[in-house]
Amino acid sequence: MAKLIKNLYLQGASGMLGGQLVYRNVNGETIVSSRPERRKTISETQRKQNTRFRNASAFAKHAIQDDVLGPIYAEAVVHMIRYQNAYTLAITDYLKAPEIGDIHLESGVSGSTLLVEAYEQPQVAKVVVDILTADERVVTSRVASLTDNGIQWKFVLTQDIPEGGSVLVKAYDLPGNVTSKAFTVE
């Protein structure tokens, strides 16, 4: 791979030349490399990843033109050095599920506050908290509300957590990815 710096004739060139050299622009620099060779057959894993990326690209194209999602991605990318544009951020958002951190529970009795840490760039769309019995039947299921710090989600228990019960937290992002994490209550 070669980098062309201040070359009057090739500055800003992109594409393939003579079926052998490929010119790309990366962060304002022109990079020259040999033409990549593709395998004649791809593995099942590669096929799945290609499909996943194709779906991410389709989502991103739709999202940046959407009246609701477009401004979210456009505003978020302004504050992020890592992403060049809203389209790239939307692709990354599609490919990466939200993360759930710890929970903070005052006690397992009705009226207690449960705080859940859930985060993703640019944002988590919603967090659902399920209170389960010891045999994993759902006692209650509701959407938590986002706190002022933007990372913690607040859920107030409307009834006691059953003995041996657990808390199941589900975080949803803008593309619809879901992450679940169960916490046992002692």
Image: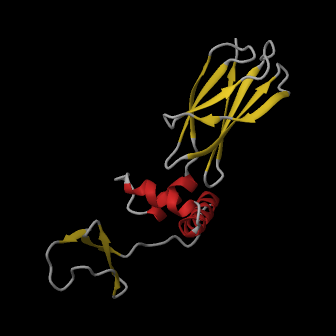
Label tally: 0
Above/below status of 30 relative to 133: below
Between 144 and 3, the one lying in front of the other is 144
Q: Is residue 164 left or right of residue 36?
A: right
What residue do we see at 81% from left, 29% from top?
140
Q: Quadrant of residue 34?
A: bottom left
The picture places residue 98, in percent across and down from the top left corner, at 57, 43
What residue do we see at 64% from left, 43% from top?
126
Above/below status of 12 relative to 162: below
The picture places residue 20, in percent across and down from the top left corner, at 34, 82
Above/below status of 158 relative to 95: above
Q: Is residue 173 left or right of residue 6?
A: right
Classify the position of the C terminus by image quarter.
top right
Between 157 and 174, the one lying in front of the other is 157
The picture places residue 30, in percent across and down from the top left corner, at 25, 73
Q: Quadrant of residue 135?
A: top right
